[in-house]
Amino acid sequence: METTVKKQRTLVGVVTSTKMKDTITVAVNRYVKHPKYKKYVKKTKKYLAHDPGNTKTEGERVTIAPCKPISKNKHFSVV
């Protein structure tokens, strides 16, 4: 039996906050088509991501990937 490797879901977003220790806030945008009006609407969701050493700055574009839970709200790490 062959083992298959499941591809992780990576997200690309912009760093909005670096005020926490080893943690950054990343805003990820996605476009969703409205079911009735057929117009694309921008939806934004913020994720907390682990950034060891605080190497990222605000406004920087980063890629994050899921990992095991680090804290109550932090489930992503910077790739």
Image: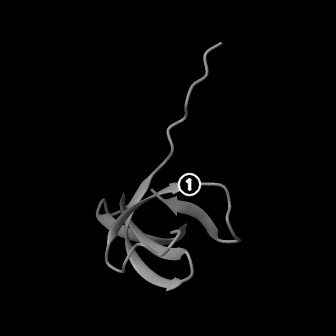
Which residue does the image show at 42% across and 72% down from the upper left?
55
The extreme right residue here reads 72
Decide: is 8 above or below 6. below
Q: Position of residue 63 (x, y in %)?
A: 40, 59
Q: Seen in the image, is 77 located left or right of residue 11?
A: right
- Name the residue nearer the viewer: 12 or 56: 56
For residue 74, which quarter of the picture? bottom right
Quadrant occupied by the C terminus: bottom left
Decide: is 35 above or below 7. below
Residue behind mark 1: 66
**Kind of residue at disc 1:** Pro
For residue 41, which quarter of the picture? bottom left
Judging from the image, what secondary structure is the residue with disc 1 in?
strand
Q: Colour mode?
A: one colour
Decide: is 32 above or below 55. above
For residue 27, which quarter of the picture? bottom left
